[in-house]
Image (cartoon, rainbow, N blue to C red):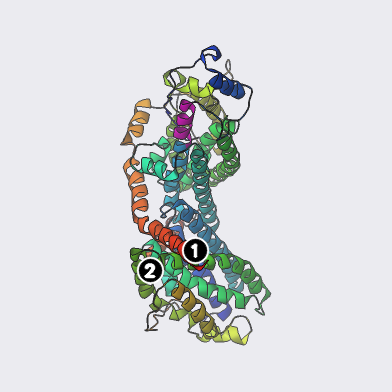
């Protein structure tokens, strides 16, 4: 997932009767579970919305390399280092498929990159939190990838073909990521007193930011209805958040860790856990750029891009030279 | 010589892979373009995997109950046996890729020779690693050519990287008593015997890259013997080994 607060450009949902024939055929195809492909007609709003959503997802994968990359050089064993490297590499790969999916909608990767670097396009709020101990590598895999999977699994059925297909591949890898995160947490939770302390501390710091990943409560989520009608959003924010809490609480119990929410309680009537809302003021501040690491994350991406310019230009110039030499020889 | 030459030799192979793998992994998430992020992570992953194989075998040969992790994370600078080239800092992307190329060209020649080693375990690791390193060399030489023969700026930067790193090339070909023992046992080639092929390959690549090989073949040494590493390795270890040393009782 990693898409939050995607602004819809539609002016509310039209009924089938209000649509012109083209749009009606489009909506009926979606309603029947069909896929929309790049060359098919689609409403402008659908296209724009998808570009924002897929772009934000891609940017999240790219920026998401940084908090985990932060620990690759300090990984505690060769095997953990290799697993973490592979995981971060997968994320770069996910970024690549997603940029390709977005490009089928008529936007270039360069344009999206410029919009990320200028701050115009967003990435998930979660990556603006710091990773402070090795246990955070566990918590990120377990909670952050766990939350991402909640949203991404249904997106395999999303109406836009290239996005759905990218998501199939991504989901396979994400579930591996979540398992390795949980595995780190198990080692830590069953380790020395210091390791248990790290594990609990990581859970304390990542619990509410993970809940925020699903976006604001449905009652405040103004753009959901159109996205759901278009099947580019498959469940509401609150449904997914509840599902995440219901699945994660028993896992925390199994680890012997305490979720930092005193109000957390299983509700016999609903069959779900009742839990405290995250601090939405903090969430909106993070989106505005005031999270603990917004400045560093964007600065790191800008530095990488700026310092890589000569490399991109050099390789491009070489490719041009090769082509003209080949043409001259023919 | 106080330690078993085979143990020393295996540490040399393992530490080259470990130190270079670590250096390459420092690029994670900040490469010039997404495809390079993926490729650099691939190379680092291969090298860390090779480290596990070499250092595990070193630990077995030593017989002192040190496994690959113990060797990687609980030795100090003087016990590392990597060549000086691989511990040199990343610098810019050009410097990283030049270092990679100069090492890959030696590494592939060394591994190819080791496939015929009298030691079956060493031959097996070499065979697996050579497949990976063939790709590393293909990629690093393509990049050196592309950037050497790219823009004026990329050419200038690649020439500067070559000038900076060339004095670290010679060490890979200087033999010592460990190498002599390996040659005598039919385990590994004489380092000097790899030089002609290396010079040919590197010469061809640098020519295609329009880069000029420095005339002076002066060689810094002291890495593979452990006698005198550069200051850079210690800083690398403070990061790489911090967690294991701060929490020595923990398993991860």
Side of A159 relative to B147 (left or right): right
- Tag 2 residue: B158
- Tag 1 residue: A327
In the structure shown, which secondary structural element does the residue marked by tag 1 occupy? helix
Residue A282 location, quadrant? top left
> Which is nearer the eye, B186 or B194?
B194
In the structure shown, which secondary structural element does the residue marked by tag 2 occupy? helix
Q: CA distance from mark 1 to mark 2?
A: 27 Å
> Which is nearer the eye, A42 or A273?
A42
Picture layout, residue B202 above or below residue A250: below
Q: Are marks 1 and 2 in contact (CB under 8 Å)?
A: no
> Which is nearer the eye, A171 or A315?
A315
Picture layout, residue B102 above or below residue A134: below
- Comparing labels 1 and 2, the label whose residue is closer to the camera: 1
- Tell me which segment is drawn in magenta: A43-54
Label 1 Cα crowd, 10 Å radius (few <14 / some 14-19 / many 20+): few
Report in which chain the residue with disc 1 lies.
A
Residue A231 coordinates in the image, percent (x, y): 55, 26
Report in which chain the residue with disc 2 lies.
B
Residue A129 visible to the viewer: no
Side of A253 relative to B160 (left or right): right
Residue A169 coordinates in the image, percent (x, y): 60, 42
Residue B167 visible to the viewer: yes
Residue B161 coordinates in the image, percent (x, y): 37, 70
Residue B194 location, quadrant? bottom right
The numbered mark at residue B116 is none
The residue furthest top is A17
Residue A266 coordinates in the image, percent (x, y): 55, 22
Label 2 Cα crowd, 10 Å radius (few <14 / some 14-19 / many 20+): many
Residue A179 location, quadrant? top right
């Amino acid at each position: 997932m990693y898409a939050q607060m995607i602004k819809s450009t539609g002016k509310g949902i039209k009924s089938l009767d209000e649509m012109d024939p083209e749009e009606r055929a489009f909506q009926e195809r979606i309603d029947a579970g069909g896929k929309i492909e790049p060359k098919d007609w689609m409403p402008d709003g659908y296209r724009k919305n998808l570009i924002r959503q897929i772009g934000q997802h891609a940017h999240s994968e790219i920026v998401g390399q940084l908090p985990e990359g932060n620990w690759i050089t300090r990984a505690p064993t060769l095997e953990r280092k290799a697993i973490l490297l592979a995981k971060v590499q997968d994320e770069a790969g996910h970024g690549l498929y997603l940029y390709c999916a977005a490009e089928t909608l008529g936007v270039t990767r360069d344009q999206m990159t410029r919009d990320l670097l200028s701050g115009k396009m967003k990435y998930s709020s979660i990556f603006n939190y710091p990773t402070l101990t090795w246990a955070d590598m566990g918590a990120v895999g377990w909670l952050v990838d766990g939350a991402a999977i909640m949203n991404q699994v249904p997106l395999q059925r999303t109406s836009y073909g290239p996005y759905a297909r990218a998501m199939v591949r991504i989901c396979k890898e994400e579930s591996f990521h979540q398992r390795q995160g949980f595995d780190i947490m198990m080692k830590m939770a069953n380790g020395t007193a210091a390791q248990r302390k790290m594990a609990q501390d990581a859970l304390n710091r990542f619990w509410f930011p993970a809940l925020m990943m699903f976006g604001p409560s449905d009652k405040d989520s103004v753009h959901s209805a159109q996205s759901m009608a278009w099947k580019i959003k498959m469940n509401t924010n609150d449904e997914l958040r509840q599902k995440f809490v219901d699945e994660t609480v028993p896992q925390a119990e199994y680890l012997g860790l305490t979720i930092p929410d005193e109000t957390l309680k299983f509700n016999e009537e609903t069959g779900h856990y009742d839990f405290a809302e995250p601090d939405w003021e903090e969430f909106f501040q993070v989106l505005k750029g005031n999270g603990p690491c917004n400045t560093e994350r964007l600065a790191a991406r800008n530095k990488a891009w700026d310092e890589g310019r000569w490399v991109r230009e050099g390789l491009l110039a070489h490719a041009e030279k090769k082509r003209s030499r080949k043409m001259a020889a023919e | 010589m106080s330690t078993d030459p085979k143990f020393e030799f295996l540490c040399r192979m393992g530490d080259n892979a470990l130190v270079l793998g670590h250096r390459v992994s420092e690029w994670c998430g900040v490469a010039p373009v997404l495809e390079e992020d993926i490729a650099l992570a691939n190379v680092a992953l291969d090298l860390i995997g090779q480290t596990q194989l070499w250092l595990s075998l070193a630990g077995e040969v030593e017989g002192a109950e040190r496994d690959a992790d113990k060797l990687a994370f609980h030795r100090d600078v003087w016990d590392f046996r990597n060549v000086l080239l691989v511990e040199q800092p990343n610098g810019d992307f050009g410097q990283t890729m030049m270092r990679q190329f100069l090492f890959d060209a030696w590494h592939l020649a060394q591994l190819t020779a080791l496939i015929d080693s009298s030691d079956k375990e060493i031959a097996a690791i070499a065979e697996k690693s050579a497949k990976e390193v063939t790709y590393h060399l293909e990629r690093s030489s393509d990049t050196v050519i592309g950037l050497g023969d790219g823009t004026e700026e990329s050419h200038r930067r690649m020439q500067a990287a070559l000038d900076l790193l060339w004095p670290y090339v010679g060490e890979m070909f200087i033999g010592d008593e460990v190498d002599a023992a390996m040659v005598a046992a039919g385990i590994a080639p004489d380092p000097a015997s790899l030089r002609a092929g290396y010079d040919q390959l590197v010469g061809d690549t640098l020519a295609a890259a329009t880069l000029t090989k420095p005339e002076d073949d002066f060689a810094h040494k002291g890495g593979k013997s452990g006698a005198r590493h550069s200051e850079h390795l210690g800083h690398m270890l403070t990061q790489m080994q911090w967690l294991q040393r701060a929490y020595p009782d923990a398993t991860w």
